[in-house]
Amino acid sequence: MTLTELRYLVALAQQRHFGRAAESCYVSQPTLSVAIKKLEDELGVALFERRKQDITLTPIGQQIVEQAQRVLEEASAIKQLAKQGQDQLKGPLRLGAIYTIGPYLFPNLIPVLHENAPQMPLVIEENYTARLSERLRQGELDAALLALPFDEPGLVTLPLYDEPFVIVIPSSHPWTARADIPAADLAQENLLMLGSGHCFRTQVLDACPGCVQRLSDQSQRQTIEGTSLETLRHMVASGMGITVLPATAAGADRYAQRLLSIRRFSAPEPTRRVALVWRKSFPRPAAIEALRTAILDSGLSGIQPVNLT
């Protein structure tokens, strides 16, 4: 077997389609098909179940693909070791982030990272935690920014900072007369939430157990769910209700002075811990350290860096 055949194997496992896999590898479909069949013959096992509409990995195929991914990463590491003089901060870094982190971190992070590592541009992706984790394991991302708890075999998780939550209300709301708000009081209001699949939604509900009952009312679901934090902010500004945002997402905008007000939670404030995650086998530790340093130096509002010493 060759590294090229292993690359074809991993591509087919990811794409689940011979044509798309061949396109991603910049080869013809017959070339890829022949290579996969040759690999199966050499190993003496079927790696894929071929159906009319799609293909799926066999159980042994799944194990072999996971090993192939590790082999390809180790091969990449060998190339890095062979170039001891090469700068690990040279070349793109593929960085993912969940939807409630990326839009508020990247505008602060990118100028700092560009100053510290000008030859290391970011290839950015925003997605759900589960999808980012999958793409990390498959080698399609180099690192990701996620909210804890998170623990996956083969991935390193480094806590970076704690971020408090804040309450965003219309400027005409009676709560503007209060300095802080107990979390339990949220259950009395029309609380605008992100839809299912966002970990931030779960964290908000954990902070306000009384809100869970309101969310169980199916008749309200269309009016209380939004697709993004910015959508929630717009709905609050229009008078639809109140919402909870991470502190970094609650900065000044065009609504701040006339339509929105921000209030802190009463103690104990709900918070989330944000972490940087990467594969143990990732061959550019200096790039990870440069990214970590740039994040903590980017001047994010309201965060508290995690001291691990």
Image: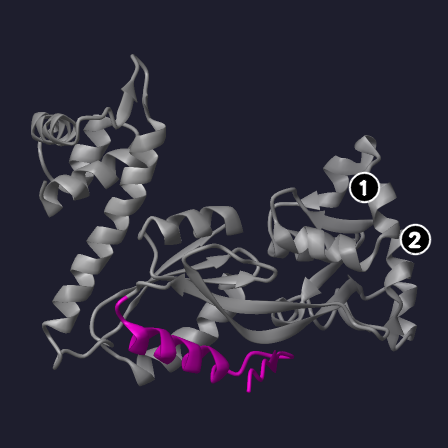
Q: Mark 1 — residue?
A: 215
Which percent across, then down, holds residue 204?
74, 57
Which percent across, then down, holds residue 34?
9, 26
Q: State yes or no: residue 247 in magenta.
A: no
Give the residue displayed 20% in from the left and 40% down from the top.
24
Give the residue displayed 62% in from the left and 69% down from the top.
273
Residue 285 in view of the camera: yes
Q: For residue 188, which numbered disc appears in the image?
A: 2
267 horizontally vs 28: left or right: right
* Residue at the farthest front position: 44
Res 95 quadrant in image: bottom left
Could you tell me which quadrant the N terminus lies in? top left
| Mark 2: secondary structure | helix
Q: State yes or no: residue 288 in magenta.
A: yes
User: Alpha-carbon neighbours of circle 2 within 10 Å: few (<14), some, or many (≥20)?
Assistant: few
- Label 1 amino acid? Leu
Magenta residues (range): 283-309
- Label 2 amino acid? Gln
Q: Nearer the viewer, mark 1 or mark 2?
A: 1
Q: State the separation of the CA atoms marked 1 and 2.
A: 12 Å
In the image, residue 172 above or below residue 137: below
Give the residue displayed 68% in from the left and 58% down from the top.
233
Residue 240 in view of the camera: no
In the image, residue 121 above or below residue 141: below
Give the residue displayed 37% in from the left and 79% down from the top.
289
